[in-house]
Amino acid sequence: MPAKEVPAAATPIKKNKPALVIPVLFSVPEAALMLGISRRLMWTFVQSGDIPIRKIGRRTLIQRSEIEKFARKDHATTVRP
């Protein structure tokens, strides 16, 4: 029995999938997790203006580049007795 020919329109089309999608904006809890600090401390930095934010609707978001820039800065620490 001869093999059936498959019409060109019925053959699946393979599309290239992106290898990795890295988000550009992160929520405050996500940014805190990235920096290894508490959400409360992250909000302190946001409220003081140390980390610039973007508001989209009701969401407070932080750009990845700002998180990276903040991580590279030298921060003074105070030691409590």
Image (cartoon, helix red, strand yellow):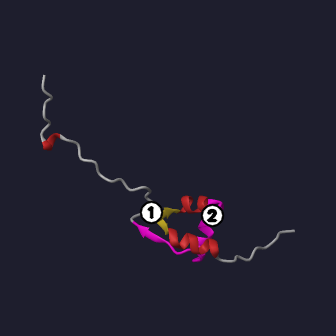
Give the SS element for disc 1: strand
Query: Which element is circle 2 on?
Result: helix
Q: Quadrant of the C terminus?
A: bottom right
**From what the image shows, is residue 52 above or below residue 24?**
below
Q: Nearer the viewer, residue 71 or 50?
A: 71
Q: Seen in the image, is 60 located left or right of residue 38?
A: left
Question: Which residue is labeled 2 in the image?
Answer: 35
x and y percent of residue 39 in the render? 61, 60
Q: Which mark sits nearer the N-terminus, 2 or 1?
A: 2
Q: Would residue 45 be found to the left or right of residue 22 on screen?
A: right
Q: Is residue 38 magenta?
A: yes
Residue 69: percent from left, percent from top: 58, 75
In the image, residue 58 lies at what x, y percent? 42, 63
| Residue appearing at x 78%, y 73% in the figure | 78
Q: Residue at x 33, y 54 (%)?
A: 16
Residue 67, compared with residue 19, is above or below; it is below
Asked whether, in this view, residue 1 is left or right of residue 40, the answer is left
Residue 11 placed where, x, y %?
Answer: 19, 41
Mark 1 is surrounded, within 10 Å at the Cα level, by few (under 14), some (14 to 19) or many (20 or more) other residues, namely: few
Residue annotated with mark 1: 59
Q: Is residue 77 magenta?
A: no
- Residue at 63% in and 71% down: 71
Numbered range of the magenta stretch: 36-56
Q: Residue furthest right?
A: 81
Cβ atoms at labels 2 and 1 below 8 Å apart: no
Q: Residue at the location (57% across, 71% down)?
A: 68
Q: Dot 2: few (<14), some (14–19), or many (≥20) neighbours within 10 Å?
A: some
Q: How many marks?
A: 2
